[in-house]
Amino acid sequence: MPEQYLAGCTALVTGAGQGLGRAISRQLAGLGAKIILGDVDADALDETARLIADQGGNTVTSVFDVSNADAVHSAFEDIGQIEILVNNAGVCPLTPPDEISEAEWDRVLAINLKGAFLCTQAALPGLQASGWGRVINIASAAGQMGGVAVGMHYAASKAGLLGLTKSFARHLAPYGVTVNAVAPGTIETDLTANWSEQVRQDLQAKIPLARFMQPDEVAAAVVFLCSPAAAAITGSTIDVNAGLLMR
Ligand SMILES: NC(=O)c1ccc[n+]([C@@H]2O[C@H](COP(=O)([O-])OP(=O)(O)OC[C@H]3O[C@@H](n4cnc5c(N)ncnc54)[C@H](O)[C@@H]3O)[C@@H](O)[C@H]2O)c1
């Protein structure tokens, strides 16, 4: 069993119902953190909670939409103070630019970018009071290099998340709170499961390691950022992309 160095900490992971958010939640729970599992999908949250209970972890579920300010504020009234926030909830349409409606643009930006802002804003009083904290934003290689398969609204939202990360890193540094991003390439989750074989093959041909990532490989970077070893890292982005983008 790994050292339980997050014992006594409470972590909110948004989009925890499946995929990367579930993997992050399981790994943080394994280090002793109490996990608030946030998502719009109550059934999916129950399944994540069951899996973590099976490994001996402690969770609370919170059903809310990160893009709705009222819903976020009301969820935080129940959640209370947290020390770790993982802004992971996201959507990723593949819509080509000439077909992106204004409503779809607004929805993608609202969930992927505004949602991270709203959750971090709501967490500020607790983070500032605790004197130690970690905020991790799940960005994407698409936000750094432009979307290869994904929509440009998605790439724009993830690029915005990197600016938000640096801004909150500056704001929260005096309180002992680090703020960083993890920028994955393509991960094997439901988000990518229905991509066509052609899209998958074209993408893998561009990746030096010639494969997509498993959720646990990306979650490991989040865990690292929560560890004592990462105490001096803030305003940074960790790339976990199998070599797709080398900066
Ligand atoms: N899968 C990939 O290849 C990949 C690559 C780079 C970055 N990412 C990012 O990783 C994160 C997780 O992706 P995933 O692959 O696990 O996706 P996923 O679709 O498997 O899971 C996303 C979760 O977010 C939840 N969600 C969606 N909208 C929400 C909202 N408004 N409020 C609260 N919860 C909401 C969904 O219900 C779902 O449980 C996303 O931010 C995504 O952009 C994924």
Image (spheres, grey):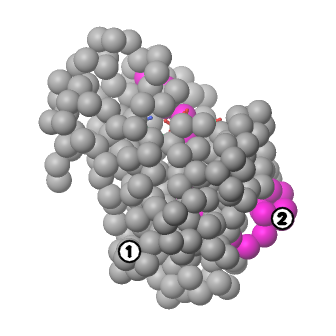
Judge whether residue 148 can be spotted in this image: yes
| Disc 1, SS | helix
Identify the residue at image location x=59%, y=63%: 85
Answer with left or right where residue 171 lies relative to residue 129: left
The quadrant of the rendered image in which ligand 1 is seen is top right
Percent x, y of residue 140: 38, 44
Residue highlighted by disc 2:
77
Between 198 and 71, the one lying in front of the other is 198
Between 166 and 178, the one lying in front of the other is 178
Q: Earlier in the sequence, mark 2 or mark 1?
A: 2
Answer with left or right where residue 185 lies relative to residue 76: left
Kindly identify the amino acid type of the residue bearing the numbered disc 2: Glu
Answer with left or right where residue 85 lies relative to residue 2: right
> What stretch of residues is rendered in magenta?
72-95
Which quarter of the figure has residue 28? bottom right
Answer with left or right where residue 56 lies relative to residue 102: right
Residue highlighted by disc 1:
230
Which quarter of the figure has residue 170? bottom left
Identify the residue at image location x=54%, y=37%: 19
Kindly identify the amino acid type of the residue bearing the numbered disc 1: Ala
Rendered position, 46 above or below 61: above
Rendered position, 32 above or below 222: below
Q: Residues within 10 Å of mark 1 (few under 14, many from 20)?
A: few
| Disc 2, SS | helix
Percent x, y of residue 36: 71, 57
User: Which mark lies nearer to you, 2 or 1?
Assistant: 1
